[in-house]
Image (cartoon, coloured by chain):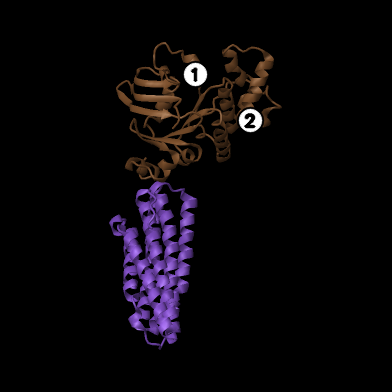
Chain colours: A purple, B brown
Amino acid sequence: MTDKFHSELKELKKGVSDMAWFAFSMLTDSQKAFINQDEALAATVIARKDQIREQMVTLEETCYQLIALNQPVAKDMRVIACSLKVIAASERIGRYGKSTAKIVKEIAGKPHIANMMSLPLMSEYVLAMIDDALTAYDTENLRKIDGFSARDDAIDALRHSIFRESITYMMENPKTITQATYYIIIARYLERCADHACKIAENVQYMETGERIEIK
Amino acid sequence: MSESIISTKNLNLWYHEKHALQDITMEIEPKKTTALIGPSGCGKSTLLRCFNRMNDLINQVKIEGELCLDGCNILSDDTDVVALRKRVGMVFQRPNPFPKSIYENIAYGPRVHGINDRKELDAIVEKSLKHAALWEEVCDRLHESALGLSGGQQQRLCIARTLAVEPEVILMDEPCSALDPIATAKIENLIEMLKEDYTVIIVTHNMQQAARVSDYTGFMYLGKLIEYDSTTTIFEHPKQDLTENYITGRFG
């Protein structure tokens, strides 16, 4: 394989990393906007939606071209395979950021209930998982994804507790139904984002070692 | 792997002073295609030529170790080399038909092995050409010169010529390197069909070709067999860094 291919592969990885961190910023900002009820910040997240899609299409196209023109094998092939998965997961994460930002607009002006339950904590945990998964992709350091299974379990437990707590509040006071339902939805989005972080981690493991793992 | 058809154990070969093959230990599975890859001068063609003792034709060659075909050491002095080469046929880099008719090219080997009955020879010629996917193209001009065929047709004729003596193993040394992509594709399709009945061992510089046609791949470097595994393992996640660096084009 030529030096040109390897430099294009490097560029691809940089592009995918940029897209992934862009998606990460969408989710991070949507969480900030939710916690601080910052409608203006939520609007900027929504505005980033088209950009993430464009990045996805361009980067996927680059992957397909690299495959078609160079028939990569071994690690080169695994980098492209992993990058395609990171692109897909990042696009989902970005879109969950956008969906959360839309909820911020829906519930604007209504005060938080029950101090948002465990949502800020859950948000912190999920963002940390995505941060580590993307850092592992960038640096090829698998230590970052050690213990992802236990971290994912903690996220699932938090989602479940937010669900139970929200139901309790709704039963006690029907006026909280709208707010509490959105809390359940956001907890669900966060849980899905943690799953995407796990998928990224699984694929980084494959990229680095060729070994398939399942983070349950 | 199921029981091997060819196995080597600590096979070493020297061309005069040069230690060209070093401690090669491998087992070749029957009715599968095995590819040998590696940079020029790594010993892959030398190893291939060991399998039917073609290196005997080169001066100052010394071979040590074990090389068995169906459990019998073919390096021993009492091996009948002619009989061995009937069982282990070879196709070379450049098509090398005899300057005779298409028919005579195929009939030559069976005649050497004592078949002279015309009907029997006709049947062998037809069967071999059909096996080599050439029959349709040449059936109406069997008695024309083989040298009038295209390069790809000549190479398939050479494969048919090898098949005519009903070998068990077919060795191919860069069989497509002198052919255009269409002729190459035909040979590759043929290799796929041949492995139903034969064991194919192919040396190729073209890694994509090794990936496409083979079930097992051996990577050689400086006379050593660095890694030998299923083709999917070699091309998806090789275990040795040297293999990785070679197949991803970082050297070679």
Q: Position of residue A83 (x, y in %)?
A: 41, 58
Question: Where B194 falls versus B100 (above or below)?
Answer: below
Q: Tag 2: residue type?
A: Leu
Q: Residue at x 36, y 56 (%)?
A: A204
Q: Amino acid at mark 1?
A: Arg
Quadrant in which residue A196 is drawn: bottom left
Q: Are marks 2 and 1 on the same chain?
A: yes
> Which quarter shows the C terminus of chain B?
top left
At 44% from the left edge and 85% from the top edge, which residue is drawn? A174
- Helix or strand or loop: what does disc 2 sit on? loop
Q: Name the one closer to the observer, A67 or B146.
A: A67
Label 2 with label 1: CB-CB less than 8 Å:
no
The residue identified by callout 1 is B85
Which comes before the other along the chain, label 2 or label 1? 1
Determine the chain carrying the residue at label 1.
Answer: B
Q: Residue at x 52, y 18 (%)?
A: B86
Task: Quarter of the image for the N terminus of chain B: give it.
Answer: top left
Q: How dense is the environment of label 1, judged by Cα within 10 Å: few (below 14), some, or many (20 and up)?
A: many
As drawn, B10 above or below A121: above
Q: Chain of mark 2?
A: B
Q: Which one is in front in this view, the residue at disc 2 or the one at disc 1?
A: 1
Q: Residue furthest right?
A: B140
Gap in Å between the C-alphas at discs 2 and 1?
23 Å
Q: Position of residue B168 (x, y in %)?
A: 52, 23
Name the outermost residue toward the bottom: A109
Label 2: how many residues lie within 10 Å, few (<14), some (14-19) or many (20+)? many
Along the viewing direction, whichever of B2 and A152 lies nearer the viewer = A152
Q: Secondary structure at mark 1?
A: helix
- Residue A15 visible to an observer of this rendering: no
- Numbered tag placed on residue B134 in the rendering: 2
Instruction: Name the residue furthest front.
Output: A172
Answer yes or no: is residue A118 visible.
yes
